Image (spheres, rainbow, N blue to C red):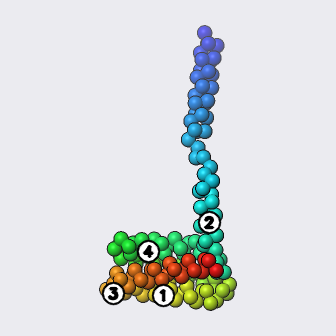
Amino acid sequence: MRHSHCSIARSVAVAAAAVFVSLGAGCSKPTDANSAGTDSAFAARSASKLGDLTSFRIIVADAANFVDEGNLAAAKTRIKDLEVAWDSAEASLRPRAPDDWQLLDKAIDRALAALLADPQDSTDCNAAMEVLLETLNSLSRS
């Protein structure tokens, strides 16, 4: 009888393992060729003479979205993140393409001035963020 219980327990364990393996395989995310293409296109779009600007672009996009939503307080916080990241990267980015660095730095300064102003003007913030995004895009195409 003892052998029978071991045999049943073993069969149940094997069946359970097979179910878990099947479930795991069914739940795994399929490879999406479009997603891979989008990721590489985004990376290519973010590459410039300055290098990969993706991290800056993400911060700028976040701040711009906050401005679009009218949440200038959140945009102000996010643009401060950009200031810190940009200043930290200056030593490595500026020598690569000084003219491009200067152009982007001025656009960042304008966005900082608009979003850190007291009081903030939503029109100025929108305009500054638009120029900053356009500058990032133009540098990524060059």
Task: Kindly identify the residue that appears in the image at 61 percent across and 86 percent down.
Answer: 100
Secondary element at image label 1: helix
Quadrant of image for the N terminus = top right
Query: Residue 70 occupies which quadrant of the picture?
Result: bottom left
Circles 4 and 1: CB distance less than 8 Å?
A: no
The CA distance from mark 1 to mark 2 is 28 Å
Which residue lies under the disc numbered 4? 63
Q: Pointer 2: residues within 10 angstroms few (<14), some, or many (20+)?
A: few
Task: Kindly identify the residue that appears in the image at 62 percent across and 26 percent down.
Answer: 14
Residue reaching furthest to the left: 119
Query: Residue 39 occupies which quadrant of the picture?
Result: bottom right
Quadrant of image for the C terminus = bottom right
Of the two numbered discs 1 and 3 on the same chain, state the one appearing first in sequence: 1
Residue 74 shows in this picture: no
Of the two numbered discs 4 and 3 on the same chain, state the one appearing first in sequence: 4
The CA distance from mark 4 to mark 1 is 14 Å
The picture places residue 122, in percent across and down from the top left corner, at 34, 81
Q: Is residue 83 left or right of residue 117?
A: right
The CA distance from mark 3 to mark 2 is 39 Å
The CA distance from mark 4 to mark 2 is 22 Å
Q: In the rendered structure, which amino acid carries the disc numbered 4? A: Ala
Of the two numbered discs 4 and 1 on the same chain, state the one appearing first in sequence: 4
The label number, if any, that marks residue 118 in the structure image:
3
Pick whichever, 49 or 59, lies toward us: 49
Which residue lies under the disc numbered 1? 109
